[in-house]
Image (cartoon, coloured by chain):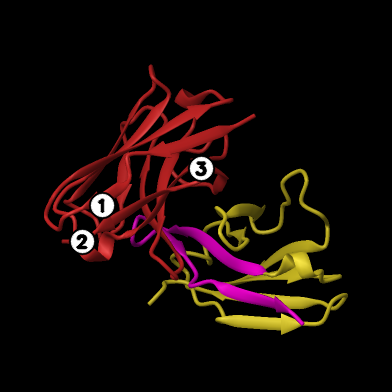
Chain colours: A red, B yellow
Amino acid sequence: QVQLVESGGGVVQPGRSLRLSCAASGFTFSSHVMHWVRQAPGKGLEWVAVISYDGSNKYYADSVKGRFTISRDNSKNTLYLQMNSLRAEDTAVYYCAKDAPLITIFGYFQHWGQGTLVTVSS
Amino acid sequence: QSVLTQPPSVSAAPGQKVTISCSGSSSNIGNNYVSWYQQLPGTAPKLLIYDNNKRPSGIPDRFSGSNSGTSATLDITGLQTGDEADYYCGTWDSSLSAGVFGGGTKLTVL
């Protein structure tokens, strides 16, 4: 069965960096578009970034553009989110999500991980 | 302020029907498929409806989706207390080149 396991969250000071990972199993990782979605405490869902199956195309939410970088290593079945210049408003649970088969950049969030909490605070 | 607009809350009695709306524009709902997600308290979101009106395996037919122009709707019939959750619509916005969600709707089963 599909499993997505995020890791790398924690408490970080404003302006610092953090890298999240999402280990995927149970499906052909290299064939699927992957996303990061976040949810601030008590708030709704916010899409963060998407990467195509081969890593050649990436799109970002305006709120993170220029600060966050999505990447993937298909040989390790792992998705990453490099987060730089972190701000208090980046505090959220970060979910990785797998898109549907045969999608080029966006279909829907077919499976979700359990999330990892990032807290940006001094 | 979310790109897609949902009512903050809806409520109905067990066994009744509830409708959750999701309003957008021609750059998102008007030209892209809509999906719906259920988030039970303390858990990750779960796919309920995709491509406007399709249900993944395991989702009961009490949940249905529809789409008309720049709006989408999620209907839930035969409400159960276990349906109490937050519901989100989502799609792609072709002008923003970004995924977008509604602000979420909290369903209370009275």
- Residue type at mark 2 is Ser
Q: Position of residue B24 (x, y in %)?
A: 50, 73
**Residue pointed to by mark 2:** A121
Asked if marks 3 and 1 fall on the same chain, the answer is: yes
Whether residue A91 sits left or right of residue B46 in the image: it is left
Is there a contact, CB below 8 Å, between mark 3 and mark 2? no
Earlier residue among tags 3 and 2: 3
- The residue lying furthest to the top in this view is A75
* C-beta proximity under 8 Å, tags 1 and 2: yes
State which tag comes first along the sequence, 3 or 1.
1
Magenta stretch: helix, strand or loop mostly:
strand
Looking at the rendered structure, which numbered label has been put on residue A113?
A: 3
| Residue A117 or residue B76, whichever sits in front | A117
The chain identifier of the residue carrying mark 3 reads A
Q: Earlier in the sequence, mark 1 or mark 2?
A: 1
The residue sitting at 58% across, 74% down in the picture is: B105
Front in this rendered view, residue B99 or A48: A48
**Relative side of A3 to B96, left or right:** right
Q: Is residue A6 visible?
A: yes
